[in-house]
Amino acid sequence: MCYQPSKRDQWEEGHGGTIVQVYDYKTERYIAPKRLESPIKMERWTYNLGSNMFIRYLTFQNGELIKIETGEKGSD
């Protein structure tokens, strides 16, 4: 069963022409700086499934899931 996130945050990082230090979440390392052609679209989904479960945070970068984190116990 798929649940809808309790909360969704969206933001953009950088803008065209900006040089950024890139963090590769798959290898957990920084890679060479690169020039952005367009802003990086970020999104964070929060799942609060109740007081018997831990809150989950899913982070997306340009639509790709890059990180899953576990937070504190949820609430009803």
Image (cartoon, rainbow, N blue to C red):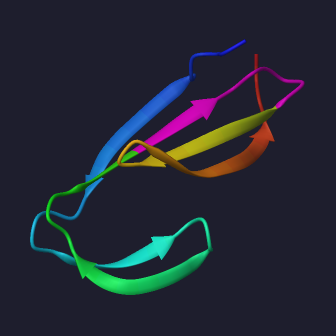
Q: Quadrant of the C terminus?
A: top right
Q: Where is residue 54 shown, x and y percent of the image?
A: 81, 36
Instruction: Please identify the residue farthest to the top as the structure is shown.
Output: 1
Q: Is residue 47 left or right of residue 54?
A: left
Magenta region: 43-53
x 46%, y 46%: residue: 64
For residue 19, what is the image quadrant?
bottom left
Where does the image place residue 43, in percent across and percent down from the top left? Answer: 41, 42
Horizontal and vertical percent position of residue 71:
74, 45
Q: Residue at x 20, y 57 (%)?
A: 39
Q: For this rendering, which residue is in front, 24 or 6? A: 24
Is residue 18 rendered to the left or right of residue 64?
A: left
Q: Which is more toward the observer, 9 or 61?
A: 61
- The answer to whether residue 34 is magenta is no
Find residue 51 and report its horizontal and vertical position in percent. Answer: 84, 23
Image point 64% across, 16% down: which residue? Answer: 3
Q: Is residue 24 above or below residue 73?
A: below
Which quadrant holds the N terminus? top right
Residue found farthest to the left: 17
Q: Quadrant of residue 52?
A: top right
Residue at 41% x, 37% y: name it.
Answer: 9
Of residues 54 and 32, which is closer to you in this image?
32
Q: Height in image: 7 above or below 67?
A: above
